[in-house]
Amino acid sequence: MAIQINETYRVFKLDTKHSSYVLGVNGDGYAGHMYYGDRLTFDGGEMSDTGNMLSLLGADQKNSIPADSQREKVNLHDTFLWEYGMPGYGDFREPCLEVDAGSGEEALEFLYKGYEVVKGKPALEGLPSTFSDDCETLVLHLSESDLKLELKLYYSVFEEEDAITRTVVVENHGGISCHLERVMSLCLDLRDGGLDLITLHGAWGRERNVYRREVGEGKQSIGSIRGVSSHQENPFMALLEPDATEDTGRVYGINFVYSGNFLAQVEKNQFGHVRAVMGIHPYHFSWKLGAGESFTAPEAVLVYSSQGIGGMTRNFHDLYRGHLIRGMYRDRKRPILINNWEATYFDFNTEKLWSIAEEAAGLGIEMLVMDDGWFGKRNDDNSSLGDWFANEEKLPGGVKRLADGVRERGLKFGIWVEPEMVNPDSDLYREHPDWILQYRDREVSRSRNQYVLDIGRKEVRDEIYRRISRVIKEAGIEYVKWDMNRSLTNVASHTAPSDEQGMVYHRYVLGVYEMQERLVTDFPELLFENCSSGGGRFDAGMLYYSPQIWCSDDTDAIERLSIQRGTAMVYPLSTMGAHVSDCPNHATHRTTPFDTRGQVALCGTFGYELDVTKLTAEEKEKIKEQTDMYHKYNDLIRSGDYYRIVVPSEKTPYDCYMVVAKDQSEALLSFVRVMHRINSWGVRIWPKGLDTAAEYRLSDRDGIYSGNMLMNVGIEINGAQKDFEGKLIHFYKERK
Ligand code: DGJ
């Protein structure tokens, strides 16, 4: 049983395979945090050791305030470890909820009312979330008697993945509406404050660099108020023991299943306790909750591992591959695609795309994707977003004629769209200038010469969806890349009254989710890829709709090593859009070997982004080898366990990781020499994750080696001596 309850002590114990999370209700009716870490072995239904456990905790955590003495209530609130911190009575840490009920008062006191345990995991209406019929969900009911608000705290327990997902529902049972000024999805109060923090930072073209530092006194936060989860800061943080490594130590990973503004914050208080919160960013958030209405906060995911950062990563990967990503392509090899963006940019027509398709078909490529520039009068990035009709000058006979011709040449066909945007120079904008996000009477700031559509409005998304889905239907489109190329600014809606303007950011995200849900429901066989100027919206929310996301506009193989490594901290390799592109690379001007470019892309979704009609015979042969390799290794890469082996540094200027099959029957090691150093000894690598008792062959040398020997003695890397050269080594089991 994943959830055990001791009714006498009002203690709730949530068990996964390797972790326990314990919470309880004190004598005052406060829901408090008791423990999160390695699995506690007291089981057996009644949890007879619960009393013992309580006696280990500090008096403030288990006792109520003596009825005859309310003099230290503030102290109790200040020191209590809360399941959901509230303002106004003495908890001075970051609050989880703020309500404007019109009275001007701030204080909230939610008291325990009861609980329920639900089999499976309730879906969150209109929001992406993990799913399972097998897990168990604890719902804790709390109530605020003065404001007549009810709070439900949800905990779903995924035993195999060592994950607990959290969300919060606020219900208004009062007779009047109020405004929720902030609703965090997760609060984690930890007693032991000696922790490090890992977050992912970046920029356009330099997404998701791993940044580790000590959790210091005071607050450290990351977040986004760009309307998207952003290139700059990903909605993820890990708290870990200071001496935790890639393979050892306790790590708590926290990730937000949401694609808009977020706040992720840790705070170390005067007692050394640490509070972590994650939720929608309170900036310009003010959700009007009418009488009888409820608000569901997006889901936050917690994973635990005592096997270091690598263990945390593998738990995230398993959870997302099994319980977040949906659709036909989730567990399938995706068609190898060629995208024309870096091949032609806006300068293409039907004939050009057919010539690429023709050449690609003979090389093992399976799908052609027509990127930006096929609609309206679009010949550069200044016009036509919103006019989702074929540009007949480029594509005579329309998208269908082009698509049919591509299919005749043996390839599937996909298109690029950017549904959330409109250019001022477009028929759509001329017809509906009030469809954009805009403050009344204020100039709207443009970015890439485009405005953001008010996707929170039904009539706007209905019309955009109608236009795009018509093209998909008519031309039998098999793949869609949904792009989004600017941050949100001037966030206000022409149709919302002033007391609803604080809902516009979140409504926008809900609108995007609604459109994407329609798309995957109406076209269940579509391969769907999200994108946002590269990886500006690479988050778990998007993965609920599309099994893959374009990782970065930087397609340089060497830059991609760190971008993909940072992305894989949380998100599975099967989700990372990765292509072989031209050299010198258009972004970095670096020239890397064709083999290395293939090797790096192979560990993502794999595809091409260059003009195959201009390649040499030798390069074309290499494509054939690479597409064969994709078919050989993709099942393993998509479904295996990912191990970081070496992160490039001054002393180790090379990158190495492995993917090991779940049954340990085979593994693939990727090594790339980022920089050659003169007079350095050979490189030895210590593989991970192999079956110690099994014997393996290696694709680049003779002999049979036990997993035990390989992982302890290590292997010398032969070859890959020069800058940017790489090498793949396949390990496969000889016999048990
Ligand atoms: C940004 C994307 O990341 C690119 O791959 C490409 O689709 C361009 N937009 C097209 O405008």
Image (tube, rainbow, N blue to C red):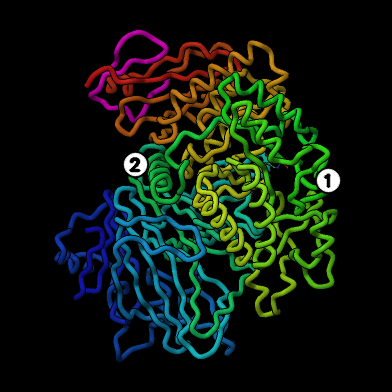
| Front residue of 690 and 193 | 690
Q: Local crowd at mark 2 within 10 Å, few (<14), some, or many (≥20)? A: some
Query: What element does badge 1 sit on?
Result: loop
Residue 377 marker: 1
Q: Position of residue 105 (x, y in %)?
A: 55, 86
Residue 634 magenta: no
Residue bearing mark 2: 307
Ligand 1 in which quarter: top right
Q: Is residue 204 left or right of residue 546?
A: right
Position above or below: 68 against 550:
below
Choose top left, top right, bottom left or bottom right for residue 596: top right
Residue 59 marker: none
Position above or below: 716 against 512:
above
| Front residue of 86 and 658 | 658
Position above or below: 323 against 139:
above
Q: Local crowd at mark 1 within 10 Å, few (<14), some, or many (≥20)? A: many
- Viewer can see residue 308: yes
- The residue lying at 78 percent from left, 32 percent from top is 348
Position above or below: 383 against 505:
above
Task: Tell which circle, 1 or 2, labels the residue nearer the N-terminal end.
Answer: 2
Choose top left, top right, bottom left or bottom right for residue 225: bottom right
Label 2 CB-ligand 1 distance < 8 A: no
| Front residue of 607 and 501 | 607
Closer mark to the observer between disc 1 and disc 2: 1
| Front residue of 181 and 126 | 126
Q: What is the spatial separation of the Cα atoms under label 1 and label 2, in whole angstroms?
A: 55 Å
Q: Position of residue 442 (x, y in %)?
A: 83, 69
Residues in magenta, as a range: 685-705
Q: Position of residue 163 (x, y in %)?
A: 36, 53
- Viewer can see residue 243: no
- The residue lying at 76 percent from left, 28 percent from top is 351
Q: Amino acid at mark 2?
A: Gln
